[in-house]
Image: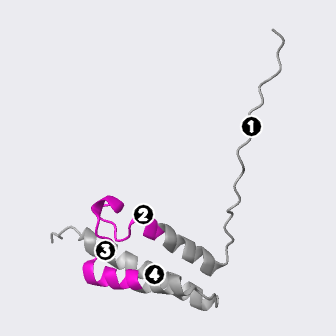
Amino acid sequence: MKRTPPDRKAQAKRAALNALKRVRRQADRAEVKLSDWEGEFLGSVEERVKTYGRAFADPEKGGPGAAFSVLQSVKLKEIAAKAKGEKKDMTRKPFKRRVKPYSED
């Protein structure tokens, strides 16, 4: 029996919907209160993936077989980290002045 190759777009769509459901479930189980914006983001992305198979229109914003754009996947990871209770380390080190070694010429 010969099988046809899997449909990459359908696989990406299923994986994206499962990722969205997983993040929402994690937040519910951990009883983490998502902001209004985060809840709206998850709902709108889920709706676009169900309707169009991907959540972005511009092909330059994500891979050809991807369901999320790069920034959408970053936001999804941030929401997942919030649901897990992980703290994000946003401390930045300031620029330091370079000190040239003292030399007597």
**Where is residue 98 shown, x and y percent of the image?**
74, 33
**Residue 2 versus residue 102: which sits nearer the camera?**
102
Q: Residue 52 is drawn in which quadrant? A: bottom left
Say what secondary structure mark 4 lies in: helix
Mark 2 burial class by Cα count in 10 Å: few <14, some 14-19, many 20+ = some
Q: Which residue is mark 4?
A: 41
Q: Quadrant of the C terminus?
A: top right
Q: Which residues are magenta?
A: 44-73
| Amino acid at dot 1 | Arg
Q: Residue furthest top?
A: 105
Q: Which residue is mark 2?
A: 70
For this view, does 59 lie left or right of residue 24?
Answer: left
For this view, does 7 lie left or right of residue 71?
Answer: left
Q: Which residue is mark 3?
A: 54
Q: Determine contact: label 4, label 1, CB under 8 Å.
A: no
Query: What is the distance, in whole Å, between disc 2 and disc 3 at their CAs?
Result: 12 Å
Say what secondary structure mark 3 lies in: loop
Query: What is the distance, in whole Å, between disc 4 and disc 1 at their CAs?
Result: 41 Å
Q: Tell me which residue sits at (34%, 66%) in the image.
A: 66
Q: Which residue is mark 1?
A: 97
Q: Determine contact: label 1, label 2, CB under 8 Å.
A: no
Earlier sequence position, callout 2 versus callout 3: 3
Magenta span contains residue 45: yes
Magenta span contains residue 18: no
Earlier sequence position, callout 1 versus callout 3: 3
Say what secondary structure mark 1 lies in: loop
Mark 4 burial class by Cα count in 10 Å: few <14, some 14-19, many 20+ = some
